[in-house]
Image: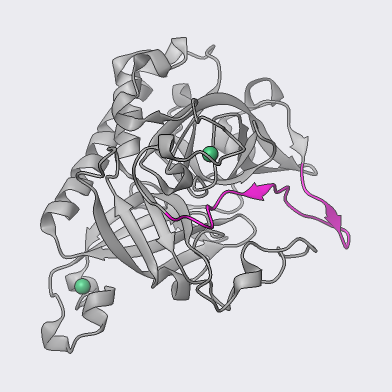
Amino acid sequence: MGNIIPNFFGSWEPYQNVECQNAWAGCDASEAGAPITGGKLVNGKLTRRRGDHEVDERCVEVGGPLSSMSSCTKHPGHTDFIPVPEFGLRHLPRPYRNKLVLDFLKACANLVVRLHLGFISDGRPEKWPGTEDRYPFAVHRGTDLVSNVGSGWVSRVRPCWEEHGLCRCATCREMEDEGKERRWWEVLIVTARHVVFDSVEAKMCEVTLFDDHKDGSGSVVLMAYEMGLGHTEEDFCFVMCATHDPKVAERLQEMMDERETLSDMIVQQYQHVDDIPTNTVVISHPHGRMKYVSVGEFKGLEKMGDKWIYSFRHTAATCPGSSGGVVLPLIGWWRGLFRAAPHNFALTSSENLSGRWGFFF
Ligand SMILES: [Zn+2]
Ligand SMILES: [Zn+2]
């Protein structure tokens, strides 16, 4: 059995060795999009296809609207990015244009976060494993010469004092035991590993929740303290943050409960519908600004040689800053499948590639 990862609900499922037929119950090219062979053959080994990472590496301004970002060459004007409060039925493809789907996507958006870090660990490899391609920010290893911004989402929140004792956050770490917080909650974030590579970087990573509005009102900043499981090739990782605030923990739990209730309702609604187009939604913090939603076409699952690798190709708009944001294909709902993956790469100006899926919504 391979590694295991927590699914979106915090329970555990086998992650490796999942056969396509098990997961998609007989998916084929007609519904998953034509498979493509990705990557390069290096020393007889096929590597995963990659594109340009989408960390915004010189972010000078976090939060606020994209209208103040004028230097973008990928999506000048950013017309395909919709602020979360303005995201409405008119933005949904017709078969999905109903309040339930809208409420579900907004419930997912509630959990999307911005990650901001200014230090690059010595632990980053020089090259992507098995290739001659440079690994993101390897050139800056051991320095604070970056102002990197990416995205992620909250996957779990849980009280930690019984299992882990005193709080591990950056503030408490500096204190004697008697000063450390006794009641604290761990907030688990999913992101791409090229955004936060290891615990050295995680300790310097600021995580912003609830940044949905132009004036930043309602946003909450947490400090991460550790990286959990991470996979370089498949490009995902888990970053742990801590909060002492019961209101923040409670709010996140309520948001996750709401999302779960809505996903159950969607399964009920779509379980007998099997002839609907495939679209993809991305929710992220492009350029480190406030949270935005974009909608595009689902173009297919990636295939490496004869192996499915469970990355999604799609056309939903992404920009630097979107790396690690949530990629949600609106496909498979009729089978009760809620899959998501962190955003990884731009392949072209209009086509993007997620990390490996495996996280239920
Ligand atoms: Zn842009
Ligand atoms: Zn603490």
Between 284 and 355, the one lying in front of the other is 284
Quick check: 131 above or below 181? above
Between 317 and 183, the one lying in front of the other is 317
240 to the left or right of 287: left
Q: Where, quadrant-wise, is the N terminus in this rendering? A: bottom right
Quick check: 351 above or below 246? above
43 to the left or right of 153: right
Q: What coloring was used for the rendering?
A: one colour
Q: Main secondary structure of the magenta part?
A: loop
Quick check: 211 above or below 139? above
Q: Indicate the position of residue 361 as horizontal and vertical percent values.
A: 39, 38
172 to the left or right of 7: left
Q: Residue furthest bottom?
A: 176
Q: Is residue 48 magenta?
A: yes
Q: How many marks?
A: 0
Q: Is residue 331 among what the camera can see?
A: no
Q: Indicate the position of residue 142 as horizontal and vertical percent values.
A: 56, 79
Quick check: 280 above or below 162? above
> Where ligand 2 lies, by image quadrant?
bottom left
361 to the left or right of 51: left
Between 53 and 101, the one lying in front of the other is 53
Residue drawn at 27 percent across, 38 percent down: 213
Q: Indicate the position of residue 6 as horizontal and vertical percent values.
A: 41, 54
Residue drawn at 43 percent across, 53 percent down: 190
Residue drawn at 54 percent across, 53 percent down: 55
Q: Based on the displayed image, in which of its 4 quarters is residue 140 positioned?
A: bottom right
Q: Does the magenta stretch include residue 50?
A: yes
Residue drawn at 58 percent across, 54 percent down: 16
Q: Is residue 333 among what the camera can see?
A: yes
Q: What segment carries the magenta color?
A: 38-60
